Amino acid sequence: MIKNDSMNRKLTFRLAWMLFVFCLPGVPVWMAYADSPPNIILVMTDDQGYGDLSCHGHPFLKTPNLDRLYSQSTRFTDFQVSPTCSPTRAALMSGKAPFKVGVTHTVVERERLALNAKTVAEVLKSAGYTTGIFGKWHLGDGDAYQPDVRGFDEVFIHGAGGIGQSHAGDQSDAPGTNYFDPIIKHNGRFEQTHGYCTDVFFQQTLGWIKEQGTDPEKKQPFFAYLSTNAPHSPYRVDPKYSDLFKDKCDKKQAAFLGMIVNIDENMGLLMEKMDQWNLTENTLLIFMTDNGSAAGSKIHNAGMRGGKGTVDEGGTRVPLFMRLPGTTKPGVEIEHLTRHYDILPTLADIAGATLPDYLDLDGRSLIPLINDPNAPWPERTMFFHVGRWAKAGAPERFSKGDPNPDHSKYNGFGVRTEKWRIVNARLYDIQKDIGEKSDVADQHPEVVKTLRTAYDKWWAEVRPGMVNEDATLDTPRSFEEQFEKQKQADGIPDWVAPDLGDGT
């Protein structure tokens, strides 16, 4: 009871201060948090596309909890990421184009976030936050690249790009792990969990949030980065979820959509616990995904062309919902072109963190648009590339082709402005033709020339940052080696699931 009273007094004071500051003329809304910055929860799912939500018009997938968050949030309707997952994660962490920080692939050591990149976790820690990551990292499995030395205080992750994956080089996971009862690396020690992976990641996140947010002895705001591996392949989920779709699509698609239903249930639990623990009013809750749909785009793609692994609109346009009561505005849609590397400066702005000039970020804070959707927003030209060119000495398909990045410069690239989208040699008026049905390159050669010139300049800027291209693949597999060493020395203990109260 004492803990609850203390927590309620703290929240009452904060709300009173917010109301006072909000009423001052000319004061931007985020300045209300200068002395008491909000907690931040960022949820990012893996391979779920823009159309894989009922609030975005899906004909039979039901996501009531994400729909509720959608209705409560400011939504960015032209939010662009990268065509695949590691590049998006690199941009999210660094505030820069992924090629600038070494990430041009998802495997063969080209997924490693350059060691000179400052992460959003480090930025938030500089502003007094405690930080945690739960789920997928996928920016390097070697010790020097792990999140515990990149700004995260609490680390609860699987290895590689997906649970159980292993590739040439250092990318690996704990042997024998699975989507059900995954083996997780928790603050440097492996634990045998029990339950479905998404449920486990949400439960661990909630346990940490509860500890940080409800203990009056905890004075720091928190940043929780919950990055699920679902609905990434292999498409494994309890049949009670996939059976919902067995008569509506093929088996793979049914499992994919079932994984999203499970994510939606967990989002409902997250929001329920935030309400229960009096965290909703002082927590920025963000939902996004890492690239276009991997298995759902042929069912519903919100009218767009392409999916994961393409530089078409459907490959890089994803949901972005932001909810912070009193700051974001429910139901407001922001149509300006925005990007994954805008997240870091936005969170820094909200947290009151100072960003040194030497970081030379590509992103800009979204706070002006959150404060006023009609605020001036200078147009930007944005660049995309699938990456994934060959690597000499890599096994199987990863070595096929030309390993020189410059020879792949015009293969799998895209350029976006508010109006136009270039996809290789094609040009689309994306404001009128979101489905990319009418190539208008011949009608607008001057536009093509201008955007190609801008792309050439961008390539020259990012090319020196591709520091992992020649990284050796003859390297120990850190996750596997550490797991085997612990197993032999101490064994693998069972995970102790956090007590969330109410039997959960």
Image (spheres, rainbow, N blue to C red):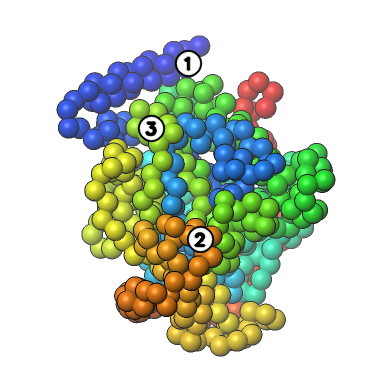
Left or right of 432 in this view: 12: left
Q: Residue at x 77, y 55 (%)?
A: 252
Q: How many marks?
A: 3
Question: Which mark, residue 329?
Answer: 3
Question: In terms of image quadrants, where is residue 332?
Answer: top left
Q: Is residue 29 visible?
A: yes
Q: Nearer the viewer, residue 431 or 348?
A: 431
Q: Looking at the image, is mark 2 or mark 3 nearer the viewer?
A: 2
Above or below — where is 25 with respect to 394? Answer: above
Q: Is residue 491 visible?
A: no
Residue 137 percent coordinates (x, y) = 55, 56
Quarter of the image containing the C terminus? top right
Question: Which mark, residue 313?
Answer: 2
Q: Residue at x 74, y 60 (%)?
A: 175
* Sequence-first disc among 3 and 1: 1
Q: Amino acid at mark 2?
A: Glu
